[in-house]
Image (cartoon, rainbow, N blue to C red):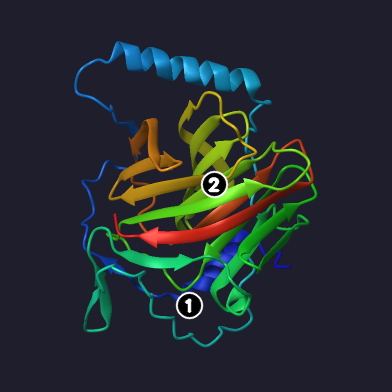
């Protein structure tokens, strides 16, 4: 199992970058300030009342939310730089337009599938995926086999991050990332997230909690701390059933999706991070022995 500090892992990965340029352009800068985005131009009091009730219902069922004050350890430079691998060419599903290539740069149109896996087999696990814990000395299990990616956390206050290594999206590249998950342990108290723009600078994390609360987190790679950028709630959530969780990172606009739908008031604007890898994560707070299976992972041009 890999147990590396986030800075060491991400610095090591910087030498194996595969650049993907998307057709969508970067949105206007906002100097890093987080700004909420209204879902409608005029007040929608009924929708607001429903959103407040959903949040209250979720709060009533949710255990105390973690402060996420996790301190990163000092990075240790790698002793040697591995040779740059030749990344695989993304194979779009049937009926998906084939992207065009200009001078070695692959360009995608909106709606194109950039990468998709149903976790069948283990041949690419060590070559294409990197995983680590926060804090970096925490115990965990992560592997890919028999059509699932399995993450198991036997301890509390531990997050496990898994990133898809071959695709690094440079500044100006927009992505939509999605995964399907199901809790497999004896309890379902955890956070399950998708990640975009992960680098040594940090990452954005779109996280769903078992009680129905959702958060958009900013992880600061320099300080090792998490900061909530936006949050809300989904009422009557059956967290034991299979679900999908997704996120779009388009310019400075960040949007949270759950079961294929954008969550109410789930879009904000923030420009602290502009490039990086995508991936998934699982967080065990005060309940240990978290077990989660992921059925697929996909990246699309939004």
**Where residue 190 appears, x then y in whole percent?**
66, 39
| In front of the other: 200 or 112 | 112
Q: Where is residue 46 in the image (x, y as percent from the top left)?
A: 33, 12
Q: In this view, does 30 lie above or below 301?
A: above
Q: Where is residue 177 in the image (x, y as percent from the top left)?
A: 42, 54
* Number of other residues with Cα within 10 Å of mark 1, as a class: few under 14, some 14 to 19, many 20 or more: few
Q: Give the tally of numbered discs.
A: 2
| In this view, 8 is above or below 122 | above
Q: Give the alpha-carbon distance from disc 2 to disc 1, as whole Å.
A: 26 Å
Whether residue 107 appears in this view of the structure is: yes
Location of mark 1 (residue): 15
Pointer 2 residue? 193
* Residue ranking furthest to the bottom: 83
Please give the name of the residue rendered at 35% of the width and 73% of the height, measured from the top-left corner. Answer: 19
User: The N terminus appears in which quarter of the rendering?
Assistant: bottom right
Q: Quadrant of residue 113?
A: bottom left
Q: Nearer the viewer, residue 162 or 70?
A: 162
Residue 199 shown left or right of residue 95 in the figure: right
Q: Which of 199 and 184 is in front in this view?
A: 184
Q: What element carries label 2?
A: strand
Q: Residue 281 appears at what percent x and percent y?
A: 59, 52
Tag shown at residue 99: none
């Amino acid at each position: 199992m890999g147990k590396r500090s986030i800075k060491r892992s991400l610095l090591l990965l910087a030498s194996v970058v595969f650049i993907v340029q998307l057709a969508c352009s970067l949105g206007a800068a906002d100097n890093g300030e987080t700004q909420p985005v209204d879902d409608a131009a005029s007040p929608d009091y009924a929708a607001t009342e429903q959103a407040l009730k959903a949040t209250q219902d979720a709060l009533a069922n949710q255990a105390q939310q973690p402060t996420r004050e996790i301190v990163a350890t000092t990075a240790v430079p790698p002793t040697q730089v591995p040779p740059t691998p030749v990344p695989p060419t993304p194979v779009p599903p049937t009926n998906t337009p084939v992207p065009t290539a200009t001078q070695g740069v692959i360009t995608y149109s909106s709606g194109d599938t950039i990468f998709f896996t149903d976790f069948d087999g283990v041949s690419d696990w060590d070559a294409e995926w990197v995983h680590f814990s926060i804090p970096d000395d925490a115990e965990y299990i992560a592997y890919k086999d028999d059509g699932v990616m399995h993450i198991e956390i036997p301890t509390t206050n531990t997050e496990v991050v898994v990133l898809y290594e071959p695709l690094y999206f440079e500044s100006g590249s927009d992505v939509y990332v999605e995964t399907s998950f199901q809790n497999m342990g004896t309890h379902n108290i955890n956070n399950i997230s998708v990640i975009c723009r992960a680098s040594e600078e940090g990452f954005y994390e779109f996280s769903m909690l078992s009680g129905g609360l959702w958060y958009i987190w900013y992880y600061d790679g320099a300080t090792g701390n998490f900061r909530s950028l936006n949050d809300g709630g989904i009422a009557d959530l059956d967290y034991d059933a299979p679900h999908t969780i997704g996120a779009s990172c388009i310019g400075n606009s960040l949007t949270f999706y759950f079961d294929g739908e954008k969550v109410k008031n789930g879009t904000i604007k923030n420009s602290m991070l502009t490039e990086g890898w995508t991936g998934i994560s699982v967080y065990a707070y005060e309940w240990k022995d978290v077990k989660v299976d992921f059925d697929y992972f996909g990246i699309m041009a939004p």
